[in-house]
Image (tube, rainbow, N blue to C red):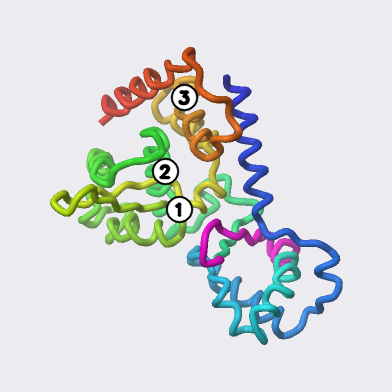
Amino acid sequence: MASTSRNASQRRNTSRSQQSIIVSQAEIQHVEIDQQVRAILNFILCHSANKVPIKHNDLVPLTDGKAEVNKRLPLVTQLLEKRYGIKLVQLEGNPKRYICIAEAPPTSTFELTAAQRPQFTLLYIILTYVFLRGCHLEESKLFTMLDTLGVNVHEEHEYFGSDISKLVEETFVKQEYLKRERSQLNPFDDPKITYSWGQRAKREFTYQQIVQFASKLFNQDVSFFQKQLMMAEAMDNPEGLPAPTPAADSTNTSYTDCNSFMESQQ
């Protein structure tokens, strides 16, 4: 089971890497590093720090038109990788947007700045909890979990600072770490807000990393979280996994067991 899960994870990561802008030598050899290339490169570098996706249309004014952007983007992509170790990835959906991913992401929080560590820690806790609760979590349950950790999103925290609710509801969402969805069955019900992993989170982190973290955090063997791992991978790549069989009905039981365990930790 673990082997199948790892293979599925590898297929998913390969698929995602293929979504980065494909650069061919044929496209690059006819383009020189001119002022328009430098303008696009500088714009991307300047806007990559805040991690908010870069819109394709924002690059057009830097050149002589949309066709010139498309012509120069492969060379810009190559320069970003070779000079700065940054991979330019196009996000799914419209309008066309890009994010910058470090080819060598930090392996420890000690590699982050003092200002980055609290945000990264909070983000990792949230992504882990969303994953363990089925990759789709109501906002009220997320905030309740944080409250049990002594983190009231509406109050200033000694480590995480102030405006925690804004960090979760806006910043992480704009950065594509979290996907925040609002639904309302009828006009008389209060709107329901749920969170899931955003596109950036799925490219910077792996479910295997989360499983390893959860295993250490809850002092459980990694096999305890295999059903959650398989569920997450099935949601990302439903056509790549075998169809459920009657013998696989124990997935629901395992998921319930994990939820019960999570509740017991609160």
Badge 2 density bin: few <14, some 14–19, many ≥20, Cα 10 Å: many
Q: Position of residue 132 (x, y in %)?
A: 40, 33
Q: How far is disc 3 from disc 1 in space, using C-alphas?
A: 23 Å
- N-terminal of the pair, mark 2 or mark 3, is 2
Q: Amino acid at mark 1?
A: Tyr
Apparent side of residue 147 relative to residue 40 in the rendered image (left or right) = left
Under tag 2, what secondary structure?
helix
Q: How many marks?
A: 3
Residue extending farthest to the top is 247
Boundaries of the magenta span:
79-96
Residue under the image location 32 percent in, 26 percent down: 259
Q: Name the secondary structure under disc 3.
A: helix
The image shows residue 191, relative to residue 232, as above or below, that is below
- Residue 262 figure quarter: top left
Label disc, if present, on residue 177 of the rendered structure: 1
Kindly report the distance in space between the C-alpha atoms of the residues bearing marks 2 and 3: 17 Å
Q: Is residue 8 above or below residue 31?
A: above
Q: Tell me the residue that label 2 is attached to.
A: 127
Q: Is residue 134 above or below residue 74?
A: above
**Residue type, label 2:** Leu
